[in-house]
Image: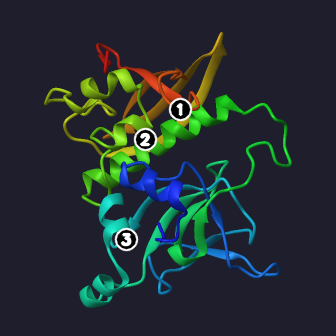
Amino acid sequence: MGIIFGAAAAQAQLHGHGPDAWQVVDVAPDDVLNLRMGPGTQYPIIGSFAPDENGLVQVTCVPFMTYEQGMNLSPASRQHLDLPSRWCLMTSADSHRQGWVSARFLAEDVTPANAGKDSTPDVEAMAVRLVERLYSLHELALRGQALSPLERPRAQDFFFRDDVALVVDHPEGADPLYDAQDFDITDFEVSLISMFRGLISVEVSFRNFGHPQKVGFALRADTQQQGAPIRIMEITHRDWSFPR
């Protein structure tokens, strides 16, 4: 998350919500932006982004700081703190590639939404990506490496605005995404089940300590938020649902 935004993006950051998408910048046309296994050049290369790739989703950045802290940290303060260069964990628009990249090669995606593609958004793919990102951020938050998507200000990026208070005040007990207090997750997969009259059904399957589990997600457009983005209405486990 570089500190090189225009006024609108900066204002969004200060309200706790960064850009919805990012793009690669300052990479030569005949080169690529390497994806690395960790935040630094000492980590192996595991993939790449094209020099003009856009639609990237940001999972988290290190050194870790909130949006507000990042925007309010002046160059002088950054130098005084002797912070290392900033790296971000990014996911491609199709969710097939993920890795760490230097933040200096990232900027807010200003590509028109319908540039080079059908003007109708692929809401089904958006729903799947939203659920995938929810779990990615949740995992990082459990390790203290990101803001939790179940807490303010991130919850509104995933859940209906009217349900944010319910999400943030979720009761103690089983984890809302895994339906367990302890977990060792393998065979994780997110799949689109159906879309009918604007209601999108997504299923998450995984094994927890070897035991198979499935979690259902119901999503649709939240008209209470600007642009009516796809948001999660309900997460359904075998015996209970969340947040409603």
Looking at the image, tell me whether mark 2 or mark 1 is earlier in sequence order.
Answer: 2
Which residue does the numbered mark 3 point to in the structure image? 62
Indicate the position of residue 208 as horizontal and vertical percent values: 33, 38
Q: Residue 92: where, in percent of width, then height? A: 63, 55
Q: CA distance from mark 2 to mark 1?
A: 20 Å
Residue 210 in view (yes/no):
no
Left or right, 48 with respect to 79, comes to right
Residue at the spot 32% in from the left edge and 59% down from the top edge: 68
For marks 1 and 3, give the one nearer the viewer: 1
Q: Which mark is residue 226?
A: 1
The foreground one among 188 and 50 is: 50
Residue placed under numbered mark 2 in the picture? 134
Quadrant of the rendering where the C terminus is positioned: top left
Q: Quadrant of residue 80?
A: bottom left
Residue at disc 3, secondary structure: strand
Q: Residue at x 68, y 79 (%)?
A: 26
Say few, some or many: other residues with alpha carbon within 10 Å of mark 2 (under 14 / 14 to 19 / 20 or more).
many
User: Is 33 positioned to the left or the right of 30 in the image?
Assistant: left
Q: Residue farthest to the left?
A: 172
Report the residue that reaches farthest toward the top: 197
Residue at screen point 75% across, 48% down: 112
* Residue drawn at (84%, 37%) of the image: 118
Left or right relative to 29: residue 157: left
